Amino acid sequence: MNITDLITRERIVCDSEVTSKKRVIEVLSELLATGQADLTPRLIFDSLIGRERLGSTGLGHGVALPHGRFNPIQQAIGAFIKIGKGVDFDAIDREPVDLVFGLLVPDHYTDEHLKILAHLAEMFSDRSFCQQLRDSDSDQTLFERLRDWRVAATMPP
């Protein structure tokens, strides 16, 4: 999977000043609606928050992967936020979250949904990579690092 199949530069925010889990999901909803005809942030928010109510998507180590299903879309879309100061996301390790990748998939994505989540979990379990994201100072740099993760992860030392 290529991350650029999910995300565009316009759906990335560096050093957001959000201060709550709810606000993170609102910003993700706005980003996910960017460039998508017939999608409103409110409907996306309802999908993401509905999934979040089932259990936190905070993975630990400062990372969260809020995700939801949404019938009107035909392919998966993603958005990414690097938060300036971590927020409480009810993560499994109780640590604040500062790296958030939001994912929206069509209802008919079953296996694909799980494969995408597995890929993202692998990506964000790479601590060196997460530190590179934390050290990024622009939306463009974040996009490039997300785009190039697989290449960098497979290059010999």
Image (cartoon, rainbow, N blue to C red):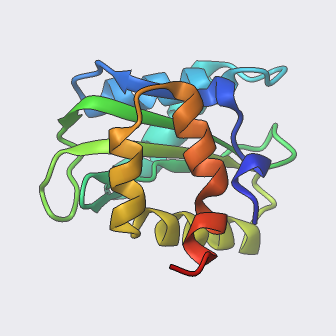
Drawn side of residue 88 relative to residue 131, left or right: left
Drawn side of residue 95 relative to residue 81, left or right: left
> Of residues 120 and 39, which is closer to you in this image?
120
Locate the N terminus by quadrant.
bottom right
Tell me the quarter of the picture where residue 10 sits: top right
65 relative to 139, above or below:
below
Residue 85 position within the rendered picture, expressed as x and y whole percent measured from the top left: 20, 30
98 relative to 17, above or below:
below
Residue 38 visible in the displayed image: yes
Residue 114 position within the rendered picture, expressed as x and y whole percent measured from the top left: 63, 72
Residue 79 visible in the displayed image: no
Residue 118 position within the rendered picture, expressed as x and y whole percent measured from the top left: 56, 73
Q: Residue furthest front?
A: 157
Q: Residue furthest left?
A: 94
Q: Determine the residue positioned at 75% across, 59% down.
A: 2
Residue 23 position within the rendered picture, expressed as x and y whole percent measured from the top left: 34, 23
Q: Residue furthest bottom?
A: 156
105 relative to 84, above or below:
below
Q: Determine the residue positioned at 37% across, 55% down.
A: 130
Looking at the rendered structure, the number of numbered marks drawn on it comes to 0
Q: Determine the residue positioned at 70% across, 21% down.
A: 34
Q: Determine the residue positioned at 78% across, 21% down.
A: 35
Tell me the quarter of the picture where residue 126 sits: bottom left
Drawn side of residue 142 relative to residue 56, left or right: right
